[in-house]
Image (spheres, rainbow, N blue to C red):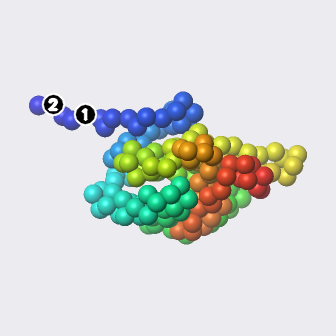
Amino acid sequence: MLGAGPAPAIEMSYALTRMYSDLSIPPPTAEQMMVCYGFGCRRRMFLDFTDADRKRLTEILAPGRASPEAERKAVQQAVVWFDRRVGPIIGTSSRVARADFRHFDAAHNFDCFDTTRNAASLLLILREWGLIRHHTVGDPRYRGNFLFGQTPHNTAVLIERTSRQGWVVDMWPRAYAELPDVMTVEQWLTEN
């Protein structure tokens, strides 16, 4: 008897595809995503989305249909939902903001490498489900210049469909279950 086979891949840009292939991790599908944690995606867990998960995310994103701004606010809530959904399972429910190697607790934290992949995966799934209408998922962005006191950092990005404005969705600067930073890419590039 033939099985259903693997879930079809979500359409992605070259940069997003490389984000997964460079780590030898599968990209998200409409049914599951690989959750990265432990700094540099050294620890991994598959998150299989249940019918209840999809229902809740649909409810969270519903107000976003009103406008691009409303959609970005709804995306913030969806990222908080994600944090609360995986935190108790993988042990990141006490994670700290801006975690890096200096915190000596990689097993219970995300660095920006992890949060970029997790947020991008969630955004791709929300787009695949038709829950993001005013934006598309953009290529991750990078900033950092030690000469100007800026540490290396990267993040997931949404692109507003009408204006083509890039908006970061950055959960790394925030602690567990806090709203992620959502700001223009231009503003984000000046932050530290």
Residue sitting at 66 percent across and 61 percent down? 173
Residue 119 visible (yes or no):
yes
Q: Residues within 10 Å of mark 2 (few under 14, many from 20)?
A: few
The residue beneath circle 1 is 5
Q: Which mark is residue 149?
A: none
Q: Is residue 94 above or below residue 68?
A: below
The amino acid on which the numbered mark 1 sits, given as a three-letter code, is Gly
Contact check, label 1 and label 2, Cβ < 8 Å = yes
Where residue 172 appears, as percent x and y from the top left, is 62, 58
SS for callout 2? loop
- In the image, taking residue 98 as reference, residue 87 lies left or right, namely left
Disc 2: which residue: 2
* Quadrant of the rendered image containing residue 6: top left
Distance CA(mark 1)–CA(mark 2): 8 Å
Picture coordinates of residue 5, whole percent (x, y)? 25, 33
Please tell me which residue lies in front, 69 or 84. 69
Placement of 74 over or under 17, stated as above or below: below
What is the three-letter code of the residue carrying label 2? Leu
Quarter of the picture holding the N terminus: top left
Residue in the picture at 63% in, 60% down: 181
Element class at badge 1: loop
Query: Counting other residues with Cα less than 10 Å from the Cα at mark 1, is it few (<14), some (14-19), or many (20 or more)?
Result: few
Could you tell me residue 80's position as x and y percent?
50, 64
- The quarter of the image holding the C terminus is bottom right
